[in-house]
Image: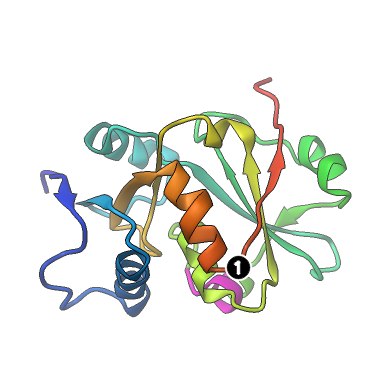
Amino acid sequence: MEMQLYDGRPADTAGRSEHETATYDLLDSLGIAYKRTDHEHADTMEACRAIDGVLGVLICKNLFLCNRQKTRFYLLLMPGDKPFHTRDLSAQINSSRLSFGSPEDMERLLGVSPGSVSVMGLMNDPQGLVTLLIDSDMLRGEYFGCHPCVNTSSLKLRTSDLTGVFLPAVRHEPTIVELPWD
């Protein structure tokens, strides 16, 4: 499938998931302009590189994390090519023993499956049970790339719309973290 760049939502959402369609509905209702491309399953950073070229923006790495007791859950957004070490994050958020959250918790809290996790999943967390962590490098660009709760489409939107419109609408205040580039 050759990827193309489209303005906004697909004209026909038949066959698309409920969560994907809900993402477009929310973005449209908030007046957030976005570009979209459709593609094969992209559940690794390597698969996202071709998508980055079409969108003209890097899709971020999205990590769903939890503490050892599974009482605190985190969604970390960071550059896809930046290495992640739990020790670099643990001290900043005062949570030791971080690990990856389970697929079941990801589905329960964000309404997405592994490979499809993105900041858009926060619309499915009205109780604010997931803490959003954003690496400061993600906020430096004019545009932001992410999945619309499925890994067969990707979006490009203004970073200012993400932080100034989307996040307040879904009632998630980000915690900004500084992760090193090794």
Residue drawn at 89 percent across, 49 percent down: 94
Q: Is residue 59 visible in this depiction of the protein?
A: yes
> Above or below — where is 137 with respect to 67?
above
Q: Is residue 117 visible in this depiction of the protein?
A: no
**Could you say which quadrant of the image residue 22 lies in?**
bottom left
Q: Give left or right: position of 32 versus 80.
A: left
Residue drawn at 31 percent across, 51 percent down: 154
Q: Amino acid at mark 1?
A: Arg
**Could you say which quadrant of the image residue 28 lies in?**
bottom left
Local packing at callout 1 (Cα closer than 10 Å; few below 14, some 14-19, many 20+) is some
In percent of width and height, residue 122 lies at 54, 66
> Above or below — where is 55 with respect to 34?
above
Residue drawn at 35 percent across, 34 percent down: 57
How has the structure been colored for display? rainbow
Most common secondary structure along the magenta stretch? helix
- The magenta segment is 106-112
> Above or below — where is 69 with respect to 37?
below
Which corner quadrant holds the C terminus?
top right
In percent of width and height, residue 140 lies at 52, 30
In percent of width and height, residue 114 lies at 49, 62
Q: Secondary structure at mark 1?
A: loop
Residue drawn at 35 percent across, 47 percent down: 157
Q: Is residue 107 magenta?
A: yes
Q: Nearest the camera: 4 or 27?
A: 27
**Residue of label 1:** 171
Q: Give left or right: position of 5 versus 119.
A: left
In percent of width and height, residue 2 lies at 10, 44
